[in-house]
Image: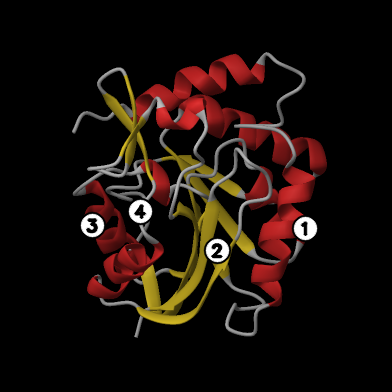
């Protein structure tokens, strides 16, 4: 299937000019309260350490974790996003490192060097065999006993025109033109992908959709043995 991961940079270029956008979207305060604080509060999630955010965008989530005391490195394939993240952190006086990097390689990150790898909703943007490559490199950069935290779309898409027009049931991907943009798999299939990459699932939950256009999220914490 065709992908265009580097095309995300064009979206960041547009969004950076729009005062209504904080990054990829808006509403990060609500998302922090509903999605990420519960993750931190889970007893399996480390309360300190070096945290790598995968697909950090404009740095909104990385900055929040840095403010919580984590040593944060954020990576994204979009140079505009990394410039924006660096600027956002500087404005707030927050210490964090942001790097332009491909999450399918993570060449800039050393083996066994991070305590936590955080999927900042990047995993569902990866398609087909790229998902296994991503998991392989996440496993590589984590220290033994390191934690991989996932928050990714899953299960059924809404039965609305905007979703059904672009969703392919066979591949479980949204398709725009010829480009596959999101993988929205069954939650059990996603968990099996993680397990087959040698992680051990410590905790998981399905967060139900909040409105008719939303999709459920799989929130999981996995261990590198």
In percent of width and height, residue 209 lies at: 62, 52
Helix, strand or loop at mark 1: helix
Helix, strand or loop at mark 2: strand
Q: Residue under label 1, please give it.
A: 33
Q: In the figure, is residue 137 to the left or right of 151?
A: left
Chain-order first, disc 1 or disc 2: 1
Q: Residue under label 2, please give it.
A: 51
Q: Is residue 118 above or below residue 42?
A: above
Q: Residue under label 4, please give it.
A: 185
* Distance from the alpha carbon under mark 1 to that under mark 2: 19 Å
* Distance from the alpha carbon under mark 2 to that under mark 4: 26 Å
The numbered mark at residue 132 is: 3
Helix, strand or loop at mark 4: loop
Point out the frontmost of discs 3 and 4: 4
Q: In the figure, is residue 57 to the left or right of 111?
A: right
Helix, strand or loop at mark 3: helix
Q: Residue at x 64, y 69 (%)?
A: 39
């Amino acid at each position: 299937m065709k992908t265009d991961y580097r095309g995300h940079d064009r979206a960041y270029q547009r969004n950076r000019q729009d005062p209504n956008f904080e990054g990829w979207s808006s509403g990060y305060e609500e998302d922090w309260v509903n999605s990420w604080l519960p993750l931190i509060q889970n007893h399996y999630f480390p309360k300190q350490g070096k945290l790598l955010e995968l697909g950090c965008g404009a740095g909104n989530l990385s900055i929040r974790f840095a403010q919580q005391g984590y040593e944060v490195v954020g990576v994204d394939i979009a140079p505009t996003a990394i410039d924006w993240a660096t600027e956002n952190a500087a404005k707030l006086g927050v210490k964090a490192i942001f790097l332009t990097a491909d999450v399918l390689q993570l060449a800039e990150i050393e083996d066994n060097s991070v305590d936590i790898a955080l999927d900042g909703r990047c995993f569902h943007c990866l398609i087909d065999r790229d998902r296994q490559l991503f998991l392989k490199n996440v496993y590589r950069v984590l220290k033994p006993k390191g934690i991989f935290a996932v928050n990714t779309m899953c299960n059924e898409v809404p039965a609305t025109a905007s979703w059904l027009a672009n969703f392919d049931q066979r591949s479980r991907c949204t398709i725009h033109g010829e480009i596959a943009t999101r993988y929205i798999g069954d939650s059990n299939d996603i968990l099996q992908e993680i397990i087959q990459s040698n992680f051990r699932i410590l905790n998981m939950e399905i967060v139900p959709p909040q409105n008719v256009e939303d999709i459920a999220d799989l929130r999981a914490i996995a261990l590198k043995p």
